[in-house]
Amino acid sequence: MDGIISAIESCLGEISKGFKRLLEGNSKLKNGSVDLGNATDILIEDFVYFLSKKQLTQSQLNRYQSADAPFEILINRIDLLKGVVLENLKPKLTLNEIETLIKSFEAFRNNIAKFFIKKQLENLAELSDSFFKKYLLFDGVLQCLKRIVDSLSKDDLSSYPLISPAECQFTRHLLYPEALMVCLKKDLCLYLHTTHQTIHHLANSLYAYYSKGLFVESYLILKNLKEEVLKFNNTLSELYFIAFSDKEYSFFSLCELLSRTKDQFITMIDIQNLKGLNSIYGEDTINKLIESAEEALNSFMRSNRETSTIIRGIVSNFYILSIDIDEELYKNIIRKISQILKSSFIINKQRIENIKYTIVGLKIEKDLNLKTKDIIKTLLFLKEKAKLEKDSTYLAITQKDKQEILSFLTEKYNEVFIETKLKNREVDVEFQPIYTTNDRSIYALEALGRIKDDDKLIPAGLFIDRVYKINRIETFDRLILQALIEKKDRIKLITDRLFVNASFNSLLNASYLNELKHLLDAFDLYVVIELTEQKFVGNIGIINDVYKRFKTVFAVDDFGAGYSSLKSVIDLAKTGGLKVLKIDGSLIKDIDKNKYTRKTVKIISNLSKELGLLTVAEFVDNESTLSFLKEAGIELCQGYLLSKPMPIEDLILNKTIKDKPNLNIFMA
């Protein structure tokens, strides 16, 4: 090494001149904001010092930092210096010395780079200690960032968070109610998810380079990592701002969205006689009381964040959304909330107690598809019922409650409403896929009739009885066929098989049959008509006529529900017109609890195979049910485990996402 140092010192003048010429001719280094003083002398002097001592002093390193020189330019200058030194010293050095010199320049670069890394870590430490870390979605990434900073600051990679995006707490938290409420704005959430993936890819790359001692590359990655974390924080801050600037709107938007996919419990909590309390204690004191109650409720709900979120409302004092829990757990949550609210609060050194609250709980099953106005309307309806209860608490969670709420909500869907909608042709369809049990691929789509109500599609369960009552089922069925013809090209993007529900009366109606012919002519599809009524039993001649005339086949719906005649099924199977048995959903729902139901399903499966029929199981809502059906030989299934009913456009989007998974979960 002494020989190399001597050689450099003997050529110092030539090296300095050559280096200056390169700097003057290199446009990348003409940066007015960069001031390293006499750059040539500093770098040469520091490099010679490094050759003898193997590392720079802190004051030498600080000089680079205080000069505010971009790291990339500094590294570029070192590389230029290396070229000049090698050019001047090659004739004077052995091959081993040249190799040592090159390695020394790499070590010199690394020494400076590691110093810059430490400084960059100080900035990252500030980010990891952000004000926002108290919010759920910030927590996972900021905790990960803190571990990165701690690990690199101590040069101890044993605690480095070497994890994939899927393993990060952020990804798990995305399924929590608070996160679902914050991530209602899809475009920002898509960007957020992409940024989160980039953060982890950069973090893992940083580990790979840092662990090999490649600090120049590590610094550049760390710099990019910081930029991505800033993007992540800014995007997430914007999402929280949007959601929290009108919490009540965001809360009910989420409830409306989930009403099609998940069972949920919505709780509304109101302080009774608020006006009277304000006059007794003063508005400021009562506002502080509400804040104290909010803090106590938030503290309790924090341990339930995986399934619940709470907001302070406007129409009512508090709202709580709970998902993925059963009725008993929900009742326990309500009991605990009641205990918290019955506690006394110290406000302005004054004990306030015996405040009365109204608590309303509503279970919304995932098939109700309620709009925000319906949910709020129902909660206010239940609030009046709660006032009649001794403890001012009313939980509408039983089937009886559900029927009462449906009756309350469907008052508007009266005969006049339906007649008007049919007259105005305000009928549309949603589609629920039918999947193969073996590989969960889409076998067919079932078309489900809906009535339009502003921007809402009303499920048939809320109005179909009235359609029959006013004798307009043929019109409704015919309008469904027309809607299908309009969507034929989009349907073909998903499947070449379509299941369509039809009433017995429609198969006797000439206008319906003409529309059916148009559908079959328009589609190059395999169309299956689902028989949905008891009238089909004993009237198989009508079905045979349609089969022979249109060459379309049939499925018996709700088989096993009690009215499907086994003889009619056998007779239809003989003709070739019957191809599918759809097992009644009540049997499928009971599979997990009832061994006799499981035996019955196996019998139906064997019967179908003997008759040459396919079998579809409806209402498949969990993995254990699907596993049993596969075992029992049921070929096809549908249910919320696999897909809810949705517009054809959403199905196309989901298919695109499945084909291109990097489009991410926010689009689902």
Image (spheres, rainbow, N blue to C red):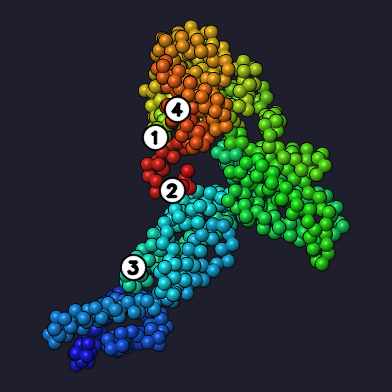
Mark 2 or mark 3: whose residue is earlier in sequence: 3
Write the residue at 79% across / 44% down: 392
Is disc 3 in contact with disc 1, using a CB cutoff of under 8 Å?
no
**Is 248 situated left or right of 218 in this image?**
right
The residue that mark 3 highlights is 209
Mark 3 or mark 4: whose residue is earlier in sequence: 3
Residue 439's label in the rendered image is 1
Secondary structure at badge 1 equals loop
What's under tag 1, amino acid-wise?
Asp
The crowding category of the residue bearing disc 3, from other C-alpha atoms within 10 Å (few below 14, some 14 to 19, many at least 20), is some
The residue that mark 2 highlights is 664
Residue 202, compared with residue 25, is above or below; it is: above
Secondary structure at badge 4 equals helix
Q: CA distance from mark 3 to mark 4?
A: 53 Å
Viewer-proximal residue among 126 and 453: 126
Image x and y of residue 363, in percent: 66, 39
The residue that mark 4 highlights is 632
Q: Nearer the viewer, mark 3 or mark 4?
A: 4
Q: CA distance from mark 3 to mark 1?
A: 41 Å
